[in-house]
Amino acid sequence: MRAERIGVYPGTFDPITLGHADIIRRGAKLVDRLIIGVTTNPSKNPLFSPDERIATVKREVAMLGIENVDVVGFNALLMKFAEKQGANVIIRGLRAVADFEYEYQMAGMNQQLNANIETVFLMADVGLQPIASKLVKEIALFGGDVTKFVSPTVRVELLSRIEEVGRQGDD
């Protein structure tokens, strides 16, 4: 009997996009259990708090109807988090060459930290490749339509938050 295959899909998910949902759906097929690690990232300025992002990701995963997915918040080195979860796979989504260069470097560093945890790259669905949380937030901040990029519920939450912080470009 083989050991349970546990995967970790880490990210800030600020907000969770249809691209993230695609990787979650596909990544969950590759492992017995997929843990979505919602993290803080000191180099990013999130619009939503960690607790808000965790709640949103949990809700969106429940709406996908995938049984083998858990959502966990973390604020630590990815490999330490993965080890604590008993993971043997890190799942990462790739949209473009720029993603590959960054992810390739990260996978190499992670392998140096723990060679027993493999990184698996999933190419984004062609129709979802341009979607990035950063761009979705920017579009929303300037009053653009984000309907094609996030679920209807996330869209409502995002627009509500934008109203709170103030829309840009209204001058």
Image: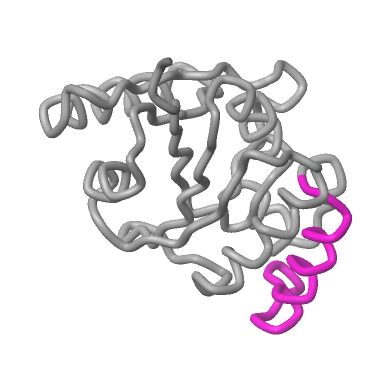
Residue 131 left/right relative to 103:
right
How far from the left and from the top, in percent, is residue 66?
73, 39
Residue at 45 percent of width and 62 percent of height:
73
Q: Nearer the viewer, residue 82 or 123?
A: 82
The quadrant where residue 76 appears: bottom left
Residue at 23 percent of width and 51 percent of height:
77
Q: Nearer the viewer, residue 132 or 21?
A: 21
Q: Is residue 102 above or below residue 59?
A: above
Boundaries of the magenta span: 150-171
How far from the left and from the top, in percent, is residue 117?
27, 26
* Magenta stretch prevailing secondary structure: helix
Q: Nearer the viewer, residue 17 or 96?
A: 17
Residue 147 left/right relative to 167:
right
What is the residue that sits farthest to the left in this orientation?
112
The quadrant where residue 71 appears: bottom right
Question: Was residue 93 drawn as part of the magenta stretch in this picture?
Answer: no
How far from the left and from the top, in percent, is residue 70?
57, 50
How far from the left and from the top, in percent, is residue 145?
85, 51
